[in-house]
Amino acid sequence: QLSGDAEHGFRLTNYAFVPIEQKVVQDNSELGQRKLGEVILGAIKQAGIKTKNVAMGLPAGKTYTAVVEVPNQTEKELKKSIKYELDQYIPMAVDEAEVDYTVLGPSPNDPNKAEVLITSTAMDYAEQEMELIEKVGLNVIAQEPEPIAMARSLAPVGSMDARIIVDLGEMSTDIVVVYKGAPRLVRSIPGGLSNLVRTVATTLNVREDQARRFILKFGLAQDKLDGQVFKALDGNLDSFAQELTKSVRFFQNKYVGAPVLGIVLSGFAGMIPFIAEYIEVKTNVQTIQGNPWQLVQVTPEQQKALLPVASEFAVAIGLAERSNA
C-alpha cells in the first residue's frame, strides 16, 4: 500500500511478504480458492492494510498485449473503429474477451498512423479472479497485465531511451521493451527459477532446496563450489540471453535508429549474483539490477526488513503506482 503520487513521490504505507506454494495458486477448486483467499486476508492483516480498493495483476500467460498501428483519427473515431476491428488484434473471440487500449503516439514508420497499445484477457478468467478478491471483502478497481505494472516501477525515471525490463519469475520470464516511457514490446517466455533449480539439482546431484540456495547465494561466481553452478547453468542462461538479443533485434527492426541502451533485471534475476555481468557479456548491452523502489520512500527499518526480497515487489509496486485517473 502506497500513499502519494508519481509527481510528488510515493511513500510505503504498509506491506507484507507471504510465501505461498505454487500448487495453492494453481488450484482452481473451491477449496483451493478459499485457501488462497485466506492467505490474502492473512497478508492484509499482517501488513495492517485498511483500504478495500485493490489493483490486481494478471499473469502474462493469461493476457495478450501488443502494439498495433491504426490510421490517425479522433478519439471518438478510434473508439468506434477499435470496437469493430478487435478481432484483427486479439487471439480470442471478441465477445469472450475483456479488452482495453491506449494511444502511444505517432507511428515511427508512417506519419498517417498512430501506435496503440492493446491488451486483452479472457472474460471468464478476469471475472473469476475478481470474484476471488471480492469474496474476501475487497473492491477491485483495476486489473492490469503484470508486465505493464512491472515496467511502470522499473523503467528508469525520465528516460526516453529504449530499455529492456526483465522479470525472472518462478515458472516463466516476462520481457518488456520500454521506449519513450511506454511499453513497445511485451513478451513472456517459458522458464523461470524452477528450471534453473532443476538443472543444478540434476547436474550436481543435490536436492532441489539445496540447488535453490546455491543459485541464490553463489549465483554464477566461478570461485564458489568450483564454479559448478555456473557450468550447470551456462547452457540455460545462454539460451535466455539469446531471447533478449532476439527482442533487441525485433524492436530495432521497427524502431530504426533507436538503440537499446540497457537491460534492467528484476525478480529472481535481481537476486542471482553475477547474472547481470553474464547477460551483459552475452548481449553486449549494459545490464543492471533494477530498483522497483526508485519512486518510493521507505524508512531505514523498512529498508532493512525488505532487503532480502526487495526485487520481488516490482509488480506489486507498479500496480500500487497506478493513477486513479
Image: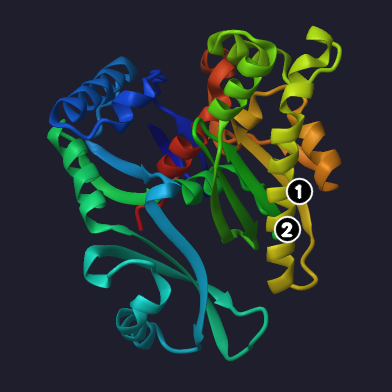
Question: Mark 2, mark 1: which one is toward the viewer?
Answer: 2
Residue 239: image x %, image y %? 71, 42
**Quadrant, the C terminus:** bottom left
Compare residues 156 and 247 and report the one nearer the observer.
Answer: 247
Q: Residue at x 75, y 39 (%)?
A: 238
Q: Quadrant of the N terminus?
A: top left
Label 2 sits on a secondary structure element that is helix
User: Relative to the observer, which residue lies in front, 66 or 1?
Assistant: 66
- Amino acid carrying label 1: it is Gly
Q: Amino acid at mark 2?
A: Val
| Residue nearest the observer in this picture, 35 or 54 | 35
Which numbered disc, 2 or 1, marks the residue that appears first in the sequence? 2
Which residue has dot 1 on it? 262
The answer to the question of whether label 2 and label 1 lie on touching residues, with beta carbons closer than 8 A, is no
Left or right position of 239 against 174: right
Please indicate, yes or no, whether residue 74 appears anywhere in the rendered image. yes
Can residue 303 be seen from the camera position used here? no
Residue bearing the label numbered 2: 248
Position in image of residue 152 (x %, y %): 53, 48
**In x, y percent, where is residue 300?**
57, 15
Place residue 255 in its image quadrant.
bottom right
Rendered residue at 70%/49% (across/down): 244
Q: Is residue 191 above or below residue 71?
A: above
Residue 307 in which image quadrant: top right
Cα–Cα span, label 2 and label 1: 10 Å
Q: Residues within 10 Å of mark 2 (few under 14, many from 20)?
A: many
